Image (cartoon, grey):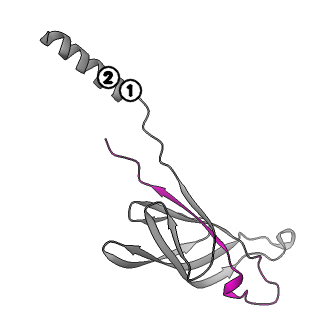
Amino acid sequence: MTILRILALTAIAVILAASPPAKAQNFAVSAVGFFERANTGPLSFSAVNIFYDDRCVDPELCFRSDDMAISVVLFGQSGLSERIMRLGRPVRVPGGTLLLAGVGAPPSPRGATPLDQYRLTFIFTPDRARR
């Protein structure tokens, strides 16, 4: 009986070791305005500032990449913290990464876009579960 139990436990360990790791589930939230609190799974945050919005007004005449930098306040168990985020570049946050994936307001050819017109899309990717 002991040999059968050892063989069964060994077989289970081999199956678990050979199985692919579980893929991390992404949490997306869209249409987030500035100063609105957003929740993406376990992460809660708010966009509070624009450092620059250097997106192209006319992509056919533009020879540079769209770029934008914002400040985000994270609400965590250990208090508040701030991260600077750039469009399309993931940032390390507690428990995973946060990506500013899109901006719902088109760039303005006549100067600054009012803050209330911005609608941001974020994607939170949690760290993979450790075995």
Q: Is residue 125 above or below residue 37?
A: above
Question: In the image, what residue type sits under mark 2?
Answer: Val
Question: In the image, what residue type sits under mark 1?
Answer: Ala
Residue named by callout 1: 18
Of helix, strand and loop, which one carries label 2? helix
Please state the horizontal and vertical placement of residue 119, each as a whole percent of the image. 67, 74
Q: Residue at x 47, y 61 (%)?
A: 97
Please state the horizontal and vertical placement of residue 80, each as a whole percent of the image. 38, 79
- In the image, the segment drawn in magenta is 106-131
Magenta-colored segment: predominant secondary structure = loop
Nearer to me, 13 or 4:
4
Outermost residue to the right: 60
Q: Is residue 31 above or below residue 34?
A: above
Residue named by callout 2: 14
Of helix, strand and loop, which one carries label 1? helix
| Quadrant holding the N terminus | top left
For the residues bearing labels 2 and 1, Cβ distance under 8 angstroms: yes
- Is residue 115 on the magenta stretch? yes
Q: Is residue 31 left or right of residue 18?
A: right
Q: Is residue 64 left or right of residue 98?
A: right
Q: Residue at x 19, y 15 (%)?
A: 5
Q: Residue at x 41, y 29 (%)?
A: 19
